[in-house]
Image (spheres, helix red, strand yellow):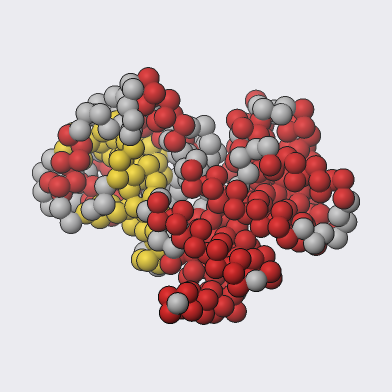
Amino acid sequence: MTEATEPALGDLTLCLVIHDRHGNLANVLQSVNRLASDMIVVDAGGGGGQSVKHLTSEYDAKYILSPADPDESALFNKALHEVKTTWALFLNQQEVLHTNDSLAFLAYLDDPDVLAYDLPIMHLSEPNNYHFETRLIRADAGIQWQHCVYPSLGESIEQVAEKKSLESPVGLIPIAVIVSLGDPDPEEWELRDTLVRVERELDQDPESARYWYHRAVLSRLLDEGDRAHTAVEEGLSVVGKHSALANREPEGVNGLIGMFCEVMLQSSFLPEKTIESLYTIFMHMPGDGRFSVPLGRILQAQNRRTDASEIQRLAISTFLSDRRYHLSLEDGLFKPAQLMWEFAAQNSDTELLKRVIDLQTQLKQRKFDSQQVLQYVYAHNESLFIRIQKILQLKLKK
């Protein structure tokens, strides 16, 4: 029997979804054991079996066996449905919660007007590289996780806040951090199993851009190029028939069009009318880095660096303002920022400095550390990093 370090303290339930191995399950349960009065573990299949069920019973956690679902939010909602406390905390299998002061953490939950809190997410391998996600929500506020593979609470929270006439539904806990241990690389059988489930969902919802995109991604990971290409074509055909998908399923539409742009780049076949259509589409939808980066490369090939730079800026603004946490920092922020700075550097130091300062200002307003972007640029374009450092130093001297 695993020993608890302290009795449970708060009106809080841990909601945890696991997919395959029972590794790290004890760590994540132990990390929340001092705070949560209840724990709910949704076992979505894979290799856990009886060992998972036994371990959850040691922590008095409720065990729910569920069919696997490519939509992580659907699994989170299964756990949320069972929550009896006021607050629910959502963690992934390869994460632990670290807080130095349990009582101070719980004190944040006493404000009845707050619907959700952002928590800083930090990778164990990169302790200085963190971002914020909404993981702590009022379970009694009628909020459900959004229907997307990497769920975001942004839209639902705003809707509930509007109904309750709340001006600031999302708060920030600066003293607690979710430490990510990093997801293990999926094995081929896991990818194929997920692909089967995605295709089953496609049979039920063939008009979904999201599922076509994930079919293409999984096929690419399995080195099945023809299958990936077909998924992109079929997905874009669906998008062409339903213009509203760009706003309803931006994660799928951006991914599909971005893949199409990558194919164009690889083939070096860049018809001007097609490029202009892609540019128009981007300017009329909430575009993200998966679309803006390959399209930017295409526009660069047409000597349209100003347009190429501008769509990177718009992609970054979308990522920051719309809380698109289903995107990684790399796709949503780092890649478009680096490309935007590369284009600016081709023009002048003055424009590069302006772009750098503008982004630093944006990130500061969102409580992001701009050093993360510079670290990424250093790792992927050292000469650009050195140039930025020089112009910043010169600016400080002046």
> Residue 60 location in percent, x, y?
21, 39
Q: Is residue 72 left or right of residue 33?
A: right
Expressed as whole percent of the image width and height from the top left, the position of residue 18 reads 41, 44
**Quarter in which the C terminus is drawn:** bottom left
Between 19 and 251, the residue placed more toward the observer is 251
Q: Residue furthest front?
A: 398
On the image, the x and y values in percent for residue 392 come to: 48, 74
Furthest residue to the top? 163
The residue lying at 26 percent from left, 47 percent from top is 173
Q: In percent of the image, x 66 and y 57: which residue is there?
A: 309
Q: Residue 343's quadrant in the figure? A: bottom right
Where residue 388 sits in the image (x, y, percent)?
54, 74
Left or right relative to 133: residue 250:
right
* Quarter of the image where one finds residue 384: bottom right
Q: Which residue does the image show at 71% across and 57% down from the upper left?
A: 306
Residue 345 visible, this orientation: yes
Q: Residue at x 35, y 42 (%)?
A: 135
Judge left or right: residue 105 versus residue 66: left
- Foreground of the two, 142 or 228: 142
Residue 213 vs 369, above or below: the answer is above
Any part of residue 222 in sight: no
Numbered-mark total: 0
Decide: is 24 above or below 15: below
